[in-house]
Image (cartoon, rainbow, N blue to C red):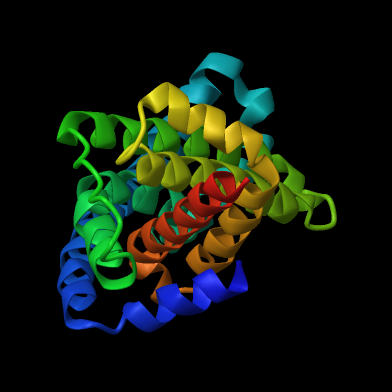
Amino acid sequence: MLDAAVLTLAQMFSPPFRKALLKSAGLALALLVLLGVGLHRLLAWLATAGEAWAESMLGQIAHTPLLVLGWMVSIAAGLGLVAGAIFLMPAVTALVAGFFVDEIAAEVERNHYPDDPEGHPLPVARAAFEGAKTALLAVGIYLLAVPFLLFAGLGIVIFFLATAFLLGREYFELAAMRYRTADEAKDLRKQNQRMVFMAGALIAAFVSIPVVNLATPLFGTALMVHLHKRLEAAKSAK
C-alpha cells in the first residue's frame, strides 16, 4: 500500500498530471467558492431575517435565546467560506474526480503498466453520477457528524472514517470499472474491503491537508489504479 502511495506521489509531478491538476483544481475551487458563498448567504439570512421570523412565531419569550443563536450564526456566516473549504472539500473532490478519472487512470496505466490491456473509458454520465452520489452521501454524513464535534473530537473521528470509507469506495470502483462491470467492481471491493478502506484512509489523510487537497482526484484515482492492478495480479497468481 505504501509503495503504491509512493508511486502515486512521484507521478503527480509529471507534466501530464500537472495538466490534469490545473483543470481539476480549477473546477474544485470554482465549486468551493459557489458553495461557500451559498453557505454564507444562508447563514447570514438565518442571523437576520430568520431570527426575526422565529421571534414573531415563538413570541417575546424566545427573544434572548434567539439573540444568542443569531449571534452564533453571525459568527458562522463570517466563517462560511472557511467552513465550506474544510467540510465540503472531500465531497467536492469526489464530484470532480468523476470528470477526470479516465484521463488520470489512463496516464497511470501507460506509465506503469504498458504491457497490460488498456482500460475502457467510463461513460461521462456514469462517472459523474458516481461522483455526485458520493458527494451527497458525504455531505449528509458530515452534517450528522457536526453535533459530535462537541464531544471530545468524536465528530473528527466520524468525519475521517466516513471520508475514508466513501472516498475509498468511489475511487476504487471508478478504477475497477475501467475493466469490469459496475457489479463486478462492487463485488471486488467487498472482497477486499480492508485493503480498500486502508487506501481510503490514505486518501482521507491527503484530503485533510489544505491546498494540497486540491490534488485529491489525482492522488485518489492513481492510488486505486495501482491497488486494482495488484489485486488483479494476486488473483491471477492463485
Q: How many marks?
A: 0
Q: Residue at x 50, y 19 (%)?
A: 56
> Is 140 in front, or is 204?
204
Quarter location, residue 148: top right
Quarter location, residue 115: bottom left
Q: Position of residue 86 (x, y in %)?
A: 49, 60
Q: Position of residue 18 (x, y in %)?
A: 21, 77
Q: Quadrant of the N terminus?
A: bottom right
User: In the orientation shown, which residue stands out farthest toward the right?
Assistant: 152
Q: Position of residue 62 (x, y in %)?
A: 66, 27
Above-or-below relation of 150 to 217: above
Q: Is residue 87 visible?
A: no
From the viewer's perspective, tell me whether residue 103 is left or right of residue 164. left
User: In the orientation shown, which residue stands out farthest toward the front?
Assistant: 238
User: In the orientation shown, which residue stands out farthest toward the top?
Assistant: 57
Quarter location, residue 21: bottom left
Q: Residue at x 38, y 33 (%)?
A: 49
Above-or-below relation of 8 to 55: below
> Is 226 in front, or is 71?
226
Q: Is residue 97 visible?
A: yes
Q: Position of residue 13 (x, y in %)?
A: 29, 84
Q: Quadrant of the C terminus?
A: top right
From the viewer's perspective, tell me whether residue 30 is left or right of residue 58. left
Q: Residue at x 45, y 62 (%)?
A: 223
